[in-house]
Image: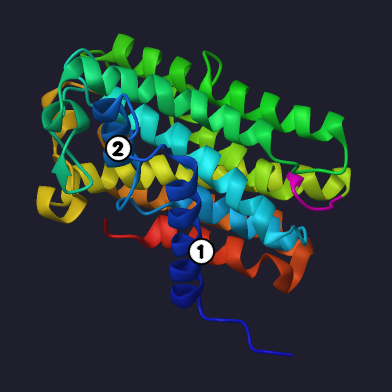
Amino acid sequence: MAKAPDFQTWTGLVRARVEEALVRALPAAGIAPERLHAAMRYATLEGGKRVRPLLAFAAGELAAAAPERLDVVAASIELIHAYSLAHDDLPCMDDDALRRGKPSVHVEFDQATALLAGDALQSLAFQLLSDTRLSESVEAQLEMVNTLAHAAGSRGMAGGQAADLASTGKTLALPELEFMHIHKTGALIRAAVALGASCGNLDAGERERLDRYGKCVGLAFQVVDDLLDAEASTATLGKTAGKDAKQGKSTYVSVLGAARAKAFAEELRADCRAALSPFGERAIRLKELADFIVLRKF
């Protein structure tokens, strides 16, 4: 049996697969309406850590899923993520001119095009998820579509963004902060794990353990994001650093302090490992991703 690649090699291979899947899924820039399609590709391709697709692949590999199915799921999730970033950066939202080390979509194009590009990316995600056979069961595939819709909607990512906007200038208690980020950031990360696993074969108890992992790793991602916003540079992050404090937003750093926030991230990493413990070495990529998310510097 061939030796499994190390984590860095594995992430490189998966990112390359996802990039190819996104290129296949996105309309070519030369197809009318050209400007909209160019903006969609600009928002999606050649950028980002691809954490959500990596989580989908890691969960899918644990569940012995076919890589071709994981290509589709990972691309669908990344399309939703790309749409959310294009919209979040708009002046009416978080008003950021920099994303992934380059001008935000509305800066490179214009606000109307950024809005339409986000709308089209969201629609394309569900088209992709429903066009391809991802499960032997029609009911199971319908549940996958439902999972992504729930994660992206008012009881998931969009609802979390609404809570974030409403809380600007206010001091949130820790439970309020967790509620906001479980939805804004955590919902799509949790869905990535669930959808990857749904492409394979796991029993109900195994899916429940992965869902617990997804909740913990999604919250850990946001805690570290808050720490990086407070401590890292714009050049390192590829987006404007220190914006949360300037906009008067409550973060894990402002609520807990940096030291306690770091300790909380480590607690969440331990919770991730505990949830994965029954899987043994089958969960190695999910464990490595939890380590990467908590220990990352960008």
Q: Secondary structure at mark 1?
A: helix
Residue 33 rendering spot, x and y as whole percentages: 31, 24
Q: Secondary structure at mark 2?
A: loop
Instruction: Say whether residue 277 is left or right of residue 202.
Output: left
Q: Amino acid at mark 2?
A: Gly
Q: Is residue 138 magenta?
A: no
Residue at far top of view? 166
Of residues 45 and 191, which is closer to you in this image?
45
Residue 217, labelled with which disc?
none
- Categorize mark 2 by other alpha carbons within 10 Å: few (<14), some (14-19), many (20+): few
Q: How is the image coloured?
A: rainbow
Residue pictured at 51% horizontal, 72% vertical: 10
In front here: 176 or 155?
155
Q: Quadrant of the N terminus?
A: bottom right
Q: Which residues are magenta?
A: 198-202
Residue 260 percent across, percent down from the top left:
35, 46
Three-letter residue code for mark 1: Val
